[in-house]
Image: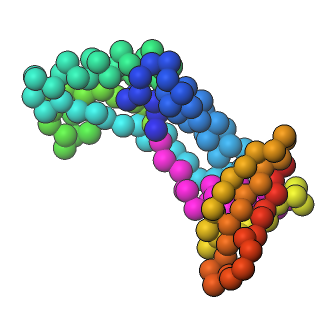
Amino acid sequence: HAGIYYQPGSSMARLCVRGADLVYQYCAKHKVPHERVGKLIVACDESEVPVLHDLHKRGTANGVKGLEILDGKQVEQLEPNVKVVAALHSPNTGICDFGALCKSFVNDVLKTGKGALHLNFEVTNIEKIGEKVLVSGKEPGQAGPYKTVKAT
C-alpha cells in the first residue's frame, strides 16, 4: 500500500510510505523482481471527482510521492482503454515477486545462523522479553508442551 487512503499522521500512513521505500530498496539490493507500474484511482463520473481530490490531499499529507490528478484525456494517454472523467495517478505504486521476496527474507535470517524457518507452525503466543522475542506454538500433530522459538 502506498499510504494514500490512511488518516494523515497515523501509524498506518507512516508505515505504508516508509515500507514502500524500504521494499523497493530491498528488492533492488537483493535482485528481487519488482517494477513501479503505477496505479490509477478513477472517477467514472463528475460526482466522484471530489473523492480523488480528498485522496490526493490525504496521500500528499502522508508523503506519498508523485501523486497527480489527471483529466480523462491524460488518463487515456496512459491507458487507452480506460474512459473516465478523471483519475488520481500514483506512479510510485508497484509490484514485486512476493514469493522471491519471502525466500530472500528467509535466506537473510538463515545466513545469520540465529534463525530457522518453521512451516505449518501454529503460533499461540508472542512475548517480548528485553531484546528477545519468544514465539510459542506447535507443529501439526504435536501433542504435549508447546515448542518455543527464540528470536533476537
Q: Is residue 52 left or right of residue 20?
A: left
> Quarter of the image holding residue 19?
top right
Which residue is painted at 30% across and 26% down in the image? 88
**Depicted 125 relative to depicted 26: above or below:** below
Q: Is residue 57 left or right of residue 31?
A: left
> Quarter of the image holding residue 26?
top right
**Depicted 22 relative to depicted 116: above or below:** above
Residue 149 position in % (x across, y down): 78, 62
Q: How many marks?
A: 0
Image colouring: rainbow
> Does 108 lie within the magenta span?
yes
**Depicted 135 relative to depicted 127: above or below:** below
Which residue is painted at 46% across and 38% down in the image? 1
Q: Which residues are magenta?
A: 94-111
Which residue is painted at 51% across and 45% down in the image? 35
Residue 136 position in % (x across, y down): 71, 62
> Quarter of the image holding residue 49?
top left
* Predominant SS of the magenta segment: helix
Q: Residue furthest right?
A: 113
Q: Is residue 65 visible from the viewing direction of this image?
A: no
Q: Is residue 138 visible from the viewing direction of this image?
A: yes
Residue 143 position in % (x across, y down): 68, 82
Which residue is painted at 19% across and 44% down in the image? 81
Q: Nearer the viewer, residue 30 or 114?
A: 114
Residue 134 position in % (x across, y down): 77, 54
> Does 46 lie within the magenta span?
no
Q: Nearer the viewer, residue 76 or 149?
A: 149
**Depicted 101 relative to depicted 43: above or below:** below
Q: Residue furthest front?
A: 144
